[in-house]
Amino acid sequence: MAACALLALLALPKPSSFAVTRRAFVHAGASAVALGAPAARAVSGGGKDFSGATISGGDFSGQSLRGKEFRQVVALGTNFRGADLRGCSFFKADLTGADFTGALMSGVSLEGANLDRAVFKDAQLDGAFFTDSITAAADISGADFSEALIPPRTVALLCARADADGKNRATSVTTRESLACAE
């Protein structure tokens, strides 16, 4: 029965703000618990996770790191170019100057992360979770933000940037189109 409640939530129309989405998800989780659903357990998918580590200057380019935890890492100037980071969590990570050029980042959590001077050129960020820190990124040209959860005020700031241009090489979606910027 709890699974039905969660499936019903997924079928709801997309809300206009990130805050509503978060509340809806928390409400659905609370409903599932109230209906007797077993508690969820986090599973890393095997292999090394990096939560809390200092990986500054590291080279993860081209690596498959799907679903790994990078929560609260210090990753200053770290190279993630072309890496498969789908489903990873970078919650409250310090990613100052990190390079995510061409990375696969569908469903990534970048909530509360320091993205000062980070590069997202041609990154696939569909369905990713952002806070306003994305505005501090150095380059978003060609990035595909389709279905990403970004606060509306932050979307407006991204649309006003000169580098909110270009077409993603893999998805052929323009950055402005993926952000639903006004023409």
Image (cartoon, rainbow, N blue to C red):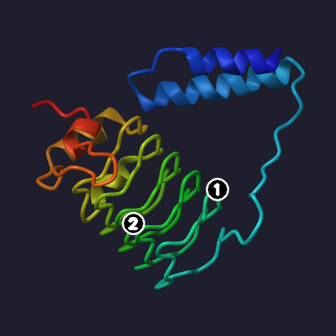
Amino acid type for the residue under numbered disc 1: Gly
Q: Do the residues under discs 2 and 1 have CB atoms within 8 angstroms?
A: no
Q: At numbered mark 2, what does the secondary structure look like: helix, strand or loop? A: loop
Residue for badge 2:
100
Q: Tell me residue 54's x, y (percent).
A: 58, 80
Residue projecting furthest to the bottom:
57
From this view, report whether residue 25 is shown above or below residue 107.
above
Q: Image quadrant for the N terminus? A: top right
Q: Which mark is residue 8?
A: none
Residue at 58% x, 51% y: name it. Answer: 87
Asked if residue 41 lies left or right of residue 108, the reply is: right
Q: Tell me residue 147's x, y (percent).
A: 41, 35
Label 2 crowd (10 A; few <14 / some 14-19 / many >=20): many
Amino acid type for the residue under numbered disc 2: Phe
**Front-lying residue, 70 or 136:** 70
Q: Tell me residue 120's x, y (percent).
A: 33, 61
Residue at 52% x, 61% y: name it. Answer: 84
Residue at 54% x, 14% y: name it. Answer: 12
Q: Tell me residue 11's x, y (percent).
A: 57, 16
Distance from the alpha carbon under mark 2 to that under mark 1: 16 Å
Q: Image quadrant for the C terminus? A: top left
Residue for badge 1:
67
Q: At numbered mark 1, what does the secondary structure look like: helix, strand or loop? A: loop
